[in-house]
Amino acid sequence: QVQLKESGGGSVQSGGSLTLSCTASNYRYGLPCVAWFRQFQDKEREGVAAIGSDGRTQYTVSVKGRFTISQSSDKKTQFLQMNNLVPDDTAMYYCAAQPLFCGTLDRTDYRSWGQGTQVSVSS
């Protein structure tokens, strides 16, 4: 398994922006297929955004037009740019890698996970 670490979470007001980052600490190669998930309190983890090896992206409906997933050119760092945040975006955010199917937003398809970073949005 790849060890992933997220950073960039924090507290913002509604309408604000945050950029989350995810890096692999024990993997010398890039990760072409990664995704971001989030978990609301007492809810299951849900897919937010995924990027495939060809650069194609997929987003859950509630974040389309507001969030952007991207990678560094060497694919060793993944980003989630979050704009126009709303209180309903408050959750623990996780990056995930090594899916069974590249580009999937199904959490059961991912083998490696980070520890998460908290995002809190106040009204």
Image (spheres, helix red, strand yellow):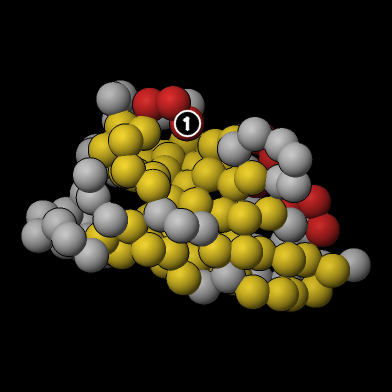
Q: Quadrant of residue 90?
A: bottom right
Q: Residues within 10 Å of mark 1 (few under 14, many from 20)?
A: some
Q: Three-letter amino acid code at disc 1? A: Arg
Work out whether residue 71 can be spotted: no
Rendering quarter of residue 47: top right
Q: Quadrant of residue 23?
A: bottom left
Q: Nearer the viewer, residue 112 or 63?
A: 112
Residue at the (26%, 38%) spot, across then down: 98
In the rendered image, the quadrant that contains the N terminus is top left
SS type, badge 1: helix
In this view, the residue in front, 68 or 24, is: 24
Residue drawn at x 62%, y 55% as measured from the top left: 92
- Whether 49 is drawn above or below 24: the answer is above
- x and y percent of residue 56 in the render? 35, 38
Please determine whether, in this image, residue 106 is positioned above or below residue 38. Answer: above
The image shows residue 71 at horizontal and vertical percentages of 31, 58
74 left or right of 91 in image: left
Q: State the residue position of label 1.
A: 107
Indicate left or right for 98 with 109 as reference: left
The residue positioned farthest toward the left in the image shown: 28
Q: Is residue 43 above or below residue 20?
A: above
Q: Position of residue 121 (x, y in %)?
A: 77, 66
Q: Position of residue 87 (x, y in %)?
A: 82, 58
All told, the count of numbered labels is: 1
Evaluate whether residue 8 shows in this view: yes
Q: Quadrant of the C terminus?
A: bottom right
